[in-house]
Image (spheres, rainbow, N blue to C red):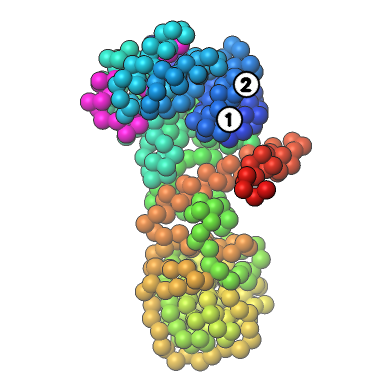
Amino acid sequence: MPKKTILQLALDLPETDRAIAIASEAANSIDWVEAGTVLIKSEGMNAVRALRKKFPRKLILADLKTFDTGELEAELAFKAGANIVTVLATADSSTISEAVKAAKRYKGKVMVDVMNASISRVKEVQSLGIDYLCLHVGIDMQNKGHTVFDRLHEIKKIANVPIACAGGLTSETAPLAAKQGAQIIIIGGAITKAANAGKAAAQIRRALKLGKPFASGNFAKFNEKNIGKAFARVSAPNLSDAMHRGGQMLGIKSIVPGAKMFGRAFTVSCAPGDWAKPVEAIDEAKKGDVIVIDAGGKEIACWGGLASASARRVGIAGVVIDGGARDIDEIRKLKFPAFARHLTPAAGDPKGAGSMQKPIVCGKVLVKPGDYIIGDDSGVVVVPREKAAEIANRAIDVNGREGRIKAEIAKGSTLSKVLKLKKWELVHSK
């Protein structure tokens, strides 16, 4: 068993030079350097060779996640300079055994990733001569709310080799994982997405040394209870990226520059210019809701300054109109978050046709009552309520990655150089 808690840095970036730069910033605080699966898939074993050359005294782990050809893949990594390779517990036992044989030949070690493996399988793999177990919760599972703490206690009870933990750990949660039995703490995004990787790594090292959490909040995972904090932190573009360039309302623009809006959708359908149901919705909606109006997309107003004043007074978070809005100067003076397809002086009449709290289409996007609506100067995005926590976490990840890129640009680079755009241009585009 390790005498102290090992801090392992997971480098899951597609570029070797960026990975090395981040690891160099964090080097004084970390023990092991991991060539992450993303890095190896992108750059191959040359990434392992580069890390070995840059960090000759650090232990290098190659996160192969091998599922077949255990001996061959392990041998490639050990020859490239790795000290440890990873194999999936769900691989056939022969694959794990072959990796163990290669490890013995090269004086290396094997870590088995137990992601999606049953407890009975975890017991089995320990009889195959492995050196470490890795309790790993993947990013996609993290975004759905799963954590290493879901299984750490049961894995600890049956483990007879050191346990490594990976899966969204931060300075707040890493000490808790160590207290519950993890001897190797694997940190990825909490360091690699930080503008100052050295400072982030030092904070996590200090938290582990003192055995108590240090609040950072930068990369915490969110759930239904605190999802508002996530949506307040990210932008509409972050959310669209998190939804694979989806969710945006087409043609809907901000009326009030600089206004940001977040809330649950209170949906309204009305005839073009019929402002009865939109105004009545102000009385029906809850504080913090966003009124979303399908007004047929026509250039006649169903909302204006008086409605905005009324909505602001009762705590409505904003309004989105697939149709017209007027009294723009008044709305801007109120600084009421309002988004519309058209700006017009002409209004219709309050006839009362339409409905409330039924699914509608606004900006060519389906909006259901209770969906999350986020708007800023870039536009409006709809997040389905059933996937809100997952998408919020993905958006936080996007936001964090962009923050790191901004920091690298500020140090004297450019966006194309940081992202190696020429390298990654599509082959068939030439």
- Which residue: 52% across, 76% down? 322
State the image coordinates of residue 93 (x, y, percent, origin top left): 29, 21
What is the crowding at mark 1: few (fewer than 14 residues within 10 Å), some, or many (at least 20)?
A: some
Magenta range is: 108-125
State the image coordinates of residue 3 (x, y, percent, origin top left): 43, 10
398 shown above or below 260: above
Q: Nearer the viewer, residue 386 or 124?
A: 124
Decide if residue 125 is on the left or right side of residue 396: left
Kindly indicate whether the residue at mark 2 contacts the one at mark 1 (C-beta within 8 angstroms): yes
State the image coordinates of residue 31 (x, y, percent, origin top left): 53, 17
State the image coordinates of residue 122 (x, y, percent, origin top left): 28, 24
Task: Give the quarter of the figure containing the N terminus.
Answer: top left
Q: Secondary structure at mark 2?
A: helix
Q: For residue 50, which numbered disc appears in the image?
A: 2
379 shown above or below 31: below
Residue 199 occupies quadrant: top right
Q: Which residue is mark 1?
A: 43
